[in-house]
Structures are given as C-alpha cells and as structure tokens.
Amino acid sequence: MEGVYRFLLTPRWWGINVFVVLSIPFCIFMGSWQLGRFEDRVESHRTAETQAEESRHEAARPLAELLPVDKATVGKQATATGRYDKQLLVPDRELDGRRGYYVLTLLRTDSGHALPVVRGWLPGEPDPAAVPAPPSGKVTVTGALHASESPGSAGTGAAAGGLPEGQTAAISTATLVNLVPYDVYDAWVTLNKGDAGMKAAPVSSPENTGLDLKAFQNLGYTAEWFAFVGFVIFMWFRLLRRERELAHDAELGLLPEEPTKAEDPTKAEDSTKAEDSTKADGPANAEQAGKPEGTDAPSRPEEQHPSPSGV
C-alpha cells in the first residue's frame, strides 16, 4: 500500500482491524439475541392474557389433572374440595391502582395436602379484624390456577422477613410448609368471585413471562449491544484519521523534532567545578606563563656590612 495509508500494514493496525472485524458481528449477534428474548416475553404476555380469558369460559377440571403447573396450565380453571384451615394475609398487592392485600386460606383436601386459596382482595393495610371468616364445613372451590411464587419476584410484596405473625410476603410453597404441619400443593388458586363481598384477585402471569422488569432489561441490553457497534466503528475511523494525519505530516517533514536529552547532572556539576577551578588558578598560571624557561625569580641581595678594620 502506497501513500499515507501504509501504516495499515503494521502489526499494530493488523491487531486493531482483527478486533473490529470480530467485535462487530459479535455485538450484532448479542443485540439480536437480547431483542429476541424481549419479543418472546411480549409474545408470552399476550398468550397468557389470551389463555386466561379463554380459560374463564372452559369447564373446571380437578386439581390433580392440572398438576404440575406450567405455562400451559397457568390460568386454567381448577376445582378442589376440602375444609378451610389456617388463614394468612398477603400485603402489598395492588388492584385497579389501589394498594391492599390478599386473604389467603389453606384448604385441607381429602388427600391430606393443603391448597392455598386466595379468597379475595381488600384495600388498605392488612387488618385481621376486617377479614371475613372462611366458610365452615366442607366446601368446593373453583378458580384460576397459579404457579407458586418466589419471594422477591414481580408482584410479590415486601421481603419475607420482618412481617407480623399471620402474614406472608409471597404465596410460596417453600414458605407455607414452614407455617403449617402438613404438606402444601405447589400451586394456588384465586376464586373467580370474591368470597364474602371481597374483590376477586386477578390472574397473574407465570414467572419469566410478561412485560416485567426482566423484559425491559432485555430491551435495554439490546440497545447497549447495538450502541457498542456504533462506538467501535466511530473509534476505528477516529484512529484511522489520526494516523493518516500523522503519516501525512511525516511525509511533509512537519513533525516536531524530538527534544534533546538533558545532560547528566553529575557531568554538568563536574564541568562547573572544573571551570571554577580554572578561573581561580588563572592569574598564577598567566604569571608563570610570562617567564622564560629555566629562570627563577631573582633572589634578594644580601646587605653589605663594613668590616671592623675598615678594609
């Protein structure tokens, strides 16, 4: 390559070009993958909404036929028979833009397992005195099936710790089995019609579906990866322009000369001392230089003393 672009053949620029060629497709792939994840969540959100609406018009099926709960059975109408037992309140649940709490009652079935049943929703702070008592005797419940929640997941309230007795943050089997002396189904249902005048709780989407925080995180990661592509291209052109200008200036001889190296301070000090010594010895050396060789300074003549005889 001729001209100012010969620097592209240097090992340094070979490394830069290889990095650019590999990083751009990688960033595009990662951005497309994150975008696909976001689109999958949007699609599952739409599917869950459609499925929940269709399930309301389907005939209820026995709970045992719908277990274990998965994406295909979430929202399906399930029925179970048993007796209501322990009752808990689930705080920090919203309905129609209002904050309230769920009334959760465990239904002891004939199998010995308990099914968590959300009998309804009440506004305000959890108040056991305001909660209607569950029906006594044997009852049959019908409602939408849900998967067990995870503490801290979307839709759950405060952390599990620090809640008063009789409250739970998440409708989770792992939490409930520590509160009752019997086994609990890994599922729960919400009644289609609120019990004792309470409002019915809405059907929630299964975890890792729907337009939750994770979905918008995927969308944010998509924007970041595509932004990296633009950044890599911008920096490559910026380095190319800078190197081209330097190469062009070098051909024209316009590059500034490199500064000379500073003298060794020890040598400079010795030179100064030698110069001072020369100045100090200058007059003596000049006087010595004005005398002819082989001559000494004249000696002082001895004084003549007359002899006592007068001779």
Image (tube, rainbow, N blue to C red):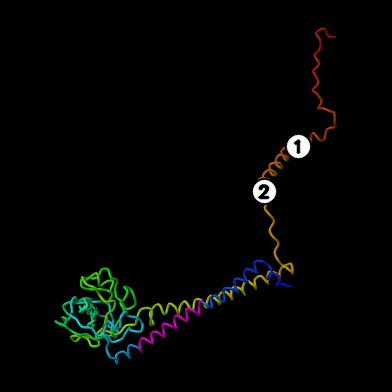
On the picture, is 14 further left or further right than 55? Answer: right
Q: Amino acid at mark 2?
A: Asp
Estimate the x, y position of residue 115 in percent, counting from the top left.
Answer: 24, 78
What secondary structure is the stretch in magenta mostly built from?
helix
Per the image, the residue denoted by label 2 is 264
The residue at the point 49 percent across, 76 percent down is 224
Snapshot quadrant of residue 183: bottom left
On the picture, is 77 further left or further right than 23? Answer: left
Residue 291, relative to residue 32: is it above or below? above
| Of callouts 2 and 1, the N-terminal one | 2
Estimate the x, y position of residue 145 in percent, counting from the top left.
Answer: 29, 83
The residue at the point 83 percent across, 33 percent down is 291
Snapshot quadrant of residue 42: bottom left
Nearest to the observer: residue 3 or residue 265 = 3
Q: Over which residues does the magenta segment extend? A: 30-50
On the picture, is 11 further left or further right than 140? Answer: right
Per the image, the residue denoted by label 1 is 283
Q: Residue furthest bottom?
A: 57
- CA distance for labels 2 and 1: 31 Å
Estimate the x, y position of residue 125 in percent, counting from the top left.
Answer: 22, 77
